[in-house]
Image (spheres, rainbow, N blue to C red):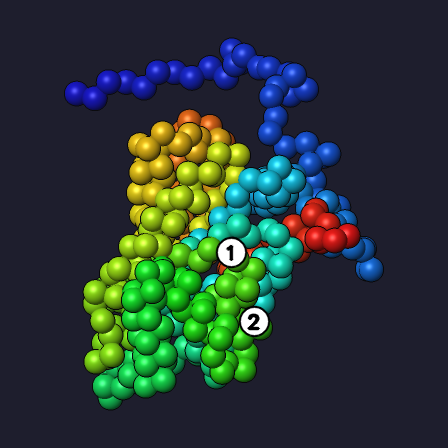
Amino acid sequence: MSPKPIRIDRSKVKTVSARRRQSKVRTRDEAKPHKPGASFAQFLKSLPDQLGAADLRLAIDAIAKAHRRDRPILWGMGAHVIKVGLAPTLVDLMERGLVSGVMMNGAGCVHDLELAMMGQTSEDVAPALDDGTFGMARETALQLNRAIAAGAEDGIGMGEAVGREIRNGRYPHKKRSILARAHDLGIPVTIHVAIGTDIHHMHESADGAALGATSYRDFETLTGLVARLDGGVLLNVGSAVILPEVFLKALALARNLGHSARRITTVNLDFIRHYRPSVNVVERPTRLGGRGISLVGHHEIMVPLLAAGLIEAVPKRGK
């Protein structure tokens, strides 16, 4: 037999004062309507001091503070960041001193090189897979594999090797290349490959030993950058698996070797929340200090917003 329900007498409800109650939202936190002709700084200030808008300002403030204190600002990015047209935005931030290092997955160098070489990239995968031509671009594979083999022979990492190739070769669009401009500015770029994930791995010109050697050198370079990250910022833009995993191992190695790397601000940007960036970028690395921030939105919108906020917050070099 089911128990009888307790009789509820609402005349005995105990109330509290709404004015004394702790509240999360106040009128002072509300948005201010945009005015025609207002500056971007005014636009940022007009956003509500809530959730994603507040986190965007926190990210801008953390990066600007790291810049003023000469602490590292490391940008990790999946290839999608380049594919949606953001290389010029990143190059501008590099020239402003707002990028201390870049880490990419293997596809990043594919799209950066193709855009520098031809002004176009990103094939239509589905029909190309149907007819067996997917990933079979001759020039892309030859240039990349040649550069990587030369880098292995010279004892340098993949990022430096591909950046050198674009910088010194006949690439008509090299000025907007992240890899080439980083080579000019002396900014380390590390490329972290998984064998078989990138189109040039399928070609006869690919050398597995060279891929492994140059990417492993880049892991060592990244660990050296992460070792100095105390007080700095690490951004992961659009990599759901490879870069969060690589960063976590670089951080573990740096701490094992006695480098503090504890007070870190980490920022993850993607259009959905993924498990590995959430735990390996936002949560775990900041347990000993610092702050983890997650910004959700399309790269082609969020990265320019972040970059514009930084440009407003940090004067350009020489000014």
Q: Nearer the viewer, residue 276 or 319?
A: 319
Relative horizontal placement of residue 28, taking residue 57 as reference (left or right): right
Can residue 318 be seen? yes
- The numbered dot on residue 176 is 2
Q: Nearer the viewer, residue 59 or 154?
A: 154
Density class for disc 2 (Cα within 10 Å; few <14, some 14-19, many ≥20) is many
Relative horizontal placement of residue 88, taking residue 120 as reference (left or right): right
Can residue 294 be seen? no
Residue 24 x/y as whole percent: 60, 29
For badge 2, the amino acid type reads Arg
Residue 314 x/y as whole percent: 69, 48
**Disc 1, SS:** loop
Badges 2 and 1: C-beta atoms under 8 Å apart?
Answer: no
- For the point 29% across and 71% down, which residue is it? 149
- The numbered dot on residue 187 is 1
Farthest residue to the front: give it. Answer: 154
- For the point 28% across and 18% down, which residue is it? 4
